[in-house]
Amino acid sequence: METRRQNNFITRRREPKRFMLWLCMASSVFIFTVLLVTYMVRKVGADWRNVSLPTVFLASTAVIIASSLTLHIANSAFRHERFTQYRLYLGTTLFLGTLFVVLQVLGWRQLMLKGVYLQTNPSGSFLFILSGLHLLHIVIGLVFLSIAFAEAMRRIPYVEAFVYSVNPPNMLKIKLFTLYWHFVDVLWLYVFLFLLYHHGL
């Protein structure tokens, strides 16, 4: 019986979009792991000059954590058919995600004002590369959030919103972009704590 259950688990048909998302997230984790390992190896070089993190990165971290909370509330509202609350918190998540992008760009500006550029020294280069690569992930998430928010705003009447909410493909879409957004939030928290430990503010 146990063997049969294991075989069913292996051969069970899985939702392809969810599988592709997990595959993409695993690839992202691998890329960032390689970069962080390269960071540790490169740090022992003689030309390494430590660069402090932009203080605005602390604010952007608080913003991205808040966006995960608002998206969680939006999902709960969606499941319980509180569609006005769903639109409000989804829009708030979109705003916070956009604010995160703005704050990251301001952080880069802080670095440049201190004379730190991508090619200045390895320490500064890693700050730009790691935060820039993560920012690309955020922008992708913002595209999907924008689409979901636009769809929600097109269905203001309760009946239209309800019909949309019970459609399985729509339910899956919301689950997937929520999973992705929480993933990029946790990814940034990990990268930020790593950089904070090695660079300080």
Image (cartoon, grey):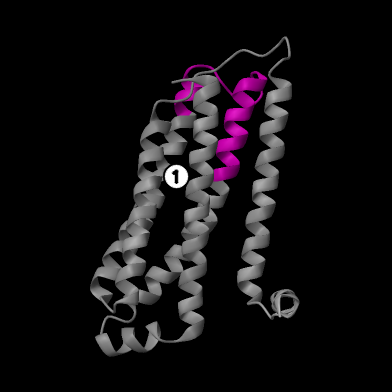
Q: Overall secondary structure of the magenta stretch?
A: helix
Q: Quadrant of the N terminus?
A: bottom right
Of residue 138 and residue 81, the one placed in the foreground of this image is: 81
Instruction: Judge left or right: residue 28 versus residue 176.
Output: right
Number of numbered discs overlaid on the protein picture: 1
**Seen from this angle, which residue lies furthest top?**
46
Instruction: Judge left or right: residue 52 versus residue 56.
Output: right
SS class, disc 1: helix
Q: Quadrant of residue 56?
A: top left
Work out whether 158 lies above or below 18: below
**Neighbourhood count class around disc 1 (C-alpha, 10 Å): few under 14, some 14–19, many 20 upward:** some
The answer to if 162 sits in the magenta stretch is no
The answer to if 114 sits in the magenta stretch is yes
Say which residue appears at 50% left-offset and 76% top-offset.
Answer: 172
Q: Magenta part of the protein: which range? A: 109-134
Tag 1 residue: 101
Of residue 115 and residue 34, the one placed in the foreground of this image is: 34
Say which residue appears at 46% left-offset and 28% top-offset.
Answer: 109
**Rendering coords of residue 156 (x, y %):** 27, 80
**Seen from this angle, which residue lies furthest front?**
1
**Rendering coords of residue 199 (x, y %):** 53, 20
Say which residue appears at 32% left-offset and 82% top-offset.
Answer: 155
**Rendering coords of residue 183 (x, y %):** 52, 53
